[in-house]
């Protein structure tokens, strides 16, 4: 998955950028309080992208 597509997806959940790290950006879902790192690669492996989405998705929101 392209990084920009992943960022758009988690932004759609209402997630906020917490900070820029050395190799990762950290995003937090303000509804659940979950914080996840997102690597700064153009391409992110599909399994990792799905895990990040699963962790940051609001469980009460309808599935996409």
Image: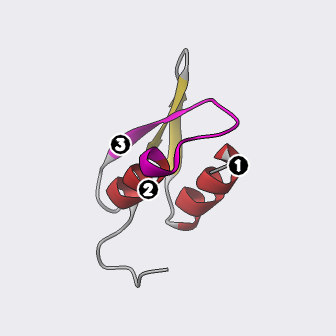
Q: Mark 1 and mark 3 in contact? Answer it, CB < 8 Å.
A: no
Q: Which residue is mark 2?
A: 50
Whether residues under marks 3 and 2 lie with C-beta atoms below 8 angstroms apart, the answer is no
For residue 12, above or below residue 41: below
Judging by the rendered image, the residue that carries numbered circle 1 is: 4
CB atoms of marks 2 and 1 within 8 Å = no
Distance between mark 2 and mark 1 Cα atoms? 14 Å
Tell me the SS state at disc 2.
Answer: helix
Q: Residue furthest top?
A: 22
Q: Nearer the viewer, residue 51 or 17?
A: 51
Camera sees residue 30: no
Given this view, does label 1 or label 3 mark the residue nearer the observer? 1
Q: Position of residue 64 (x, y in %)?
A: 49, 80
Between marks 3 and 2 in the image, the one whose residue lies nearer the viewer? 2
Tell whether 51 sits left or right of 46.
Answer: left
Callout 1 secondary element: helix
Tell me if residue 18 is in the magenta stretch: no
- Residue at the spot x=65%, y=44% of the render? 3
Residue 26: x, y in percent? 47, 35
Residue indicated by mark 3: 35
Q: Nearer the viewer, mark 2 or mark 1?
A: 2
Sequence order check: which comes first, mark 1 or mark 3?
A: 1
Q: Answer left or right for 14 relative to 4.
A: left
Q: Which mark is residue 12?
A: none
The residue located at (55%, 19%) in the rendering is: 23
Within the magenta stretch, is there residue 40? yes
Is 63 above or below relative to 57?
below
Pinpoint residue 32: horizontal percent, then vertical percent. 29, 59
CA gap between label 1 and label 3 equals 18 Å
Most foreground residue, 47 or 25:
47
Report the magenta residues as a range: 35-48
């Amino acid at each position: 998955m392209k990084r920009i597509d992943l960022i758009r997806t988690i932004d759609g959940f209402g997630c906020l950028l917490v900070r820029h790290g050395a190799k990762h950006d950290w995003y937090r879902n303000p509804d659940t309080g979950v914080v996840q790192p997102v690597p700064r690669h153009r391409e992110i492996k599909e399994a990792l992208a799905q895990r990040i989405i699963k962790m940051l998705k609001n469980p009460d929101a309808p599935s996409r």
